[in-house]
Image: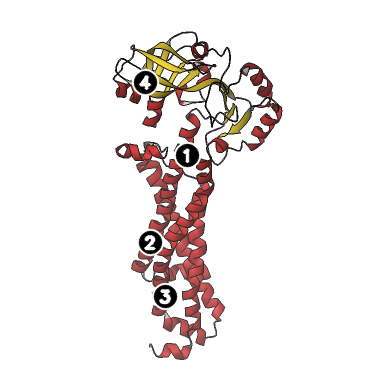
Amino acid sequence: MDIPVAWRNLWRNPRRTFIILTAIVIGISSMVVLSALSRGTMEGMVDNAIDNLVGHIRIQDPEYRVDPSITRRIDLPQQLISDIEPLLPPGSRIARRIKVDGMLSTSREHIGVIIVGIVPQDETGISFIGNPVYQGRMITADESNGLVAGEALLKRIGAKVGRKVVLMSQNHDLENVSKAFRIRGTYRTELAQTEKVYVFVPLPALQKMLGVGEGVTEIGINTGQKNNSQSMDLGGLVFRLNEKIKGSGFLAEDWHQMLPALSAYLEMFDGYMLIWFVVVFIAMGFGLVNTMLMAVYERMREFGLQRALGMRSTRIIAMVMTEILLLLALGSLLANGFAFFLIKVLLRSGIDLSLFAEGTEMWGINRIIVPVISAWDVYAANGVVLVLGLLVGLYPAVRAARFSPVETMRHL
């Protein structure tokens, strides 16, 4: 009988019930929506980092990240690939690359860039350059002087598709070498800064220019998994790869190891969200307690009469707590429906931050943030409200149980 009675008690004062329901709906829906936007931002950062020539796993000289010189190269990459392929999950993709610092020169401009030698077909599904180009066409592995550059870089130097540029870098003897290339196409990425830095040429052409034979500076691996920060556990695979190539002088690292700052942020993200949920609830909790206290004091005579008829204090506490539980459950149901409507209907195309592109790019954030709903976020937001709501509801429930028949006679 407690639940039907508690439900009727809630609607004795519909205005008060609607007020507290509104507070609960706003509180929980804001938690779910903001957590979805935050997680969408985070997943976008992970996507950008992995697609930005990092990959899920990368094999290279352990000193290359400190000293990105062509002298720190893998001379026999195909042999190394043959050794590790049996250890990789089905659907994995492997790309060989040379990545060196260089200079791009035109008749009027000299700009520092990172020159990347690639096999174009191998980059599909591994990095952003495997996507279709924005203008012109993609280079092919067998051409000797093709180049693909970022749209932002071409705007900066005032060049167009079809124009010749000169690339300069250091060869295996650390002597300056240069070669003319013709711009075949342009690419676009989420981060304009990436477009200004990387230029791509056929791997054989760059190997010949630098005089390194079949050598490469890195081997990128995509395991076929979705770029999801919560589901990617590459530690075991990296350990097996390093055991296999032990003694070669090279090291396999996953993206968590290559991007420690981003990895640390991701590890703390769930904790930040939980703290945010508690902060939002604290603001909402004061309203809940005040509203329930008002309801309790309005029914002081009723509680006193129940005590006079022999009802136990625990029974009164249970009745008030049941009312609070029903209120919280109804509010959670409405809030979740409202939050999913906002995310799936109003925000399904994402939030465009193009006006703040320079600021967002500094942190690797996409120009358009698409919210991502996580079951953990939904459960955590609702759990925080239900658990803490019942805890703060104990105070008005205990106050109701302490009313004595003599005390309530003063309020008749």
Q: Are marks 1 and 2 in contact (CB under 8 Å)?
A: no
Q: CA distance from mark 1 to mark 3?
A: 43 Å
Q: CA distance from mark 1 to mark 2?
A: 30 Å
- The residue where tag 3 is placed is 293
SS under mark 3: helix
Q: Earlier in the sequence, mark 1 or mark 2?
A: 2
Kind of residue indicated by mark 2: Ala
Instruction: Please name which of the two marks, 1 or 2, marks the residue nearer to the observer.
Output: 1
The residue drawn where x is 44% and y is 81% is 302
The residue drawn where x is 54% and y is 82% is 311
Left of 91 or right of it: where is 187?
A: left
Instruction: Please name which of the two marks, 2 or 4, marks the residue nearer to the observer.
Output: 4
- The picture places residue 130, in percent across and down from the top left corner, at 47, 21
Specify whether residue 271 is in view.
yes
Which numbered circle lies on residue 23? 2
Instruction: Please name which of the two marks, 4 or 3, marks the residue nearer to the observer.
Output: 4
SS under mark 4: loop
- The residue where tag 1 is placed is 43
The residue drawn where x is 37% and y is 26% is 196
- The residue where tag 4 is placed is 134
- The picture places residue 53, in percent across and down from the top left corner, at 50, 27
Q: CA distance from mark 1 to mark 4?
A: 24 Å
Note whether 42 is above or below 121 in the view shown. below
